[in-house]
Image (spheres, rainbow, N blue to C red):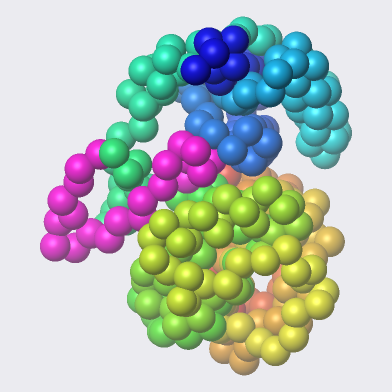
Amino acid sequence: MDESLAPMWLKTSLDCPEITLEAVVDLLGVLSGSAVEQTPVKDGQSLINGFFCLNGEDREAEQDDVLERLEQELNDLFALYELEPPKPKCSVLADEDWATSWQQFFTPFAIIPGLVIKPSWEEYVPKADEQVIEMDPGMAFGTGQHASTKLALELVRVCFDRRVQKKVLDIGTGTGILAMGATLFGAEQVIAIDNDPESVRVAGENIAHNALEGKITVSGDDLDDLTGSFDLVCANIIHDVLVEMAPAIAALVAEKGAVVLAGILQGEQEKNIIRLYEALGLSLQEARYEDEWVSLFLVR
């Protein structure tokens, strides 16, 4: 093979405030279709590294295209938080350097007690009370480690502990973690939607990788186009979107059905969401907290 045509990897590094971390990790995972590294939070900041494969003949033009799209997406994302977006720092890695460096960052971990996420190359024998979701960095791995995802999964499981949630809707599914978790907890049918085509692709790959496509349908369908009712609706998004979607979400919750909401900051955002959803006929049952995040469990 012509070495000049061997794949190269564009490493993009971003210093991000803690409030934006999950959204930025999701964005980099979806845009790159590859692994995302995140350093521990220090002084309210974390370094996030994304990796983009460059395999065209004009690497310089390909790199410029990647950076142009990334900067535009960052501008749009950080505008939601009314923050200045970080400027990506870039370096280029040879394929062999990438191949030998990134796997060390991905080992099996319990996202919540009893539910383990593992990469495909790692051997892991689950304990008697454990279930496993297998995901690879090439499928935007890593987003499940954020506090809001953990909290959402905890409350989704609480819903199943209380009663069987046969039909579930996962809004803004991302990598499909909540949809897959709900299926492993006992859901018979899960509808997973996301308005980003790359997220739909990534979630579809993850669902197929875990042989769950018989129970989970993933698509880019619009929330307003859905009909019928669901025993459980879950959405791990951000406050402003949860506000905008509130009437549509409430309308899709079955009688005695449940809602799990995450991606919400403690304090004013939390109070606003509770007030809005209770006005739509839902009653708060439980709130769970980690760091500055809160996840809410409501019932009709």
Q: Where is residue 189 in the image (x, y as percent from the top left)?
A: 51, 81
Q: Position of residue 207 (x, y in %)?
A: 47, 61
Name the quadrant containing residue 6: top right
Residue at coordinates 33% horizontally, 24% vertically from top-left?
A: 104
Start and end of the magenta stretch? 122-146
Residue at coordinates 23% horizontally, 59% vertically from top-left?
A: 130
* Most foreground residue, 61 or 241: 61
Q: Is residue 259 left or right of residue 145?
A: right
* Most foreground residue, 35 or 252: 35
* Most foreground residue, 272 or 154: 154
Residue at coordinates 66% horizontally, 87% vertically from top-left?
A: 229
Q: Is residue 174 left or right of residue 80?
A: left
Residue 19 visible in the picture: no
Q: Position of residue 26 (x, y in %)?
A: 62, 40
Name the quadrant containing residue 230: bottom right
Magenta run includes residue 39 = no
Q: How many numbered discs, if any?
A: 0
Residue 119 vs 194, above or below: the answer is: above
Location of the C terminus by quadrant is: bottom right
Q: Is residue 115 left or right of residue 282?
A: left
Q: Where is residue 132 in the image (x, y as percent from the top left)?
A: 30, 56
Q: Is the magenta stretch mostly helix, strand or loop?
A: loop
Residue 154 vs 258, above or below: the answer is: above
Magenta run includes residue 124 = yes
Residue 276 vs 251, above or below: the answer is: above
Residue at coordinates 46% horizontally, 22% vertically from top-left?
A: 40
Residue 95 visible in the picture: yes
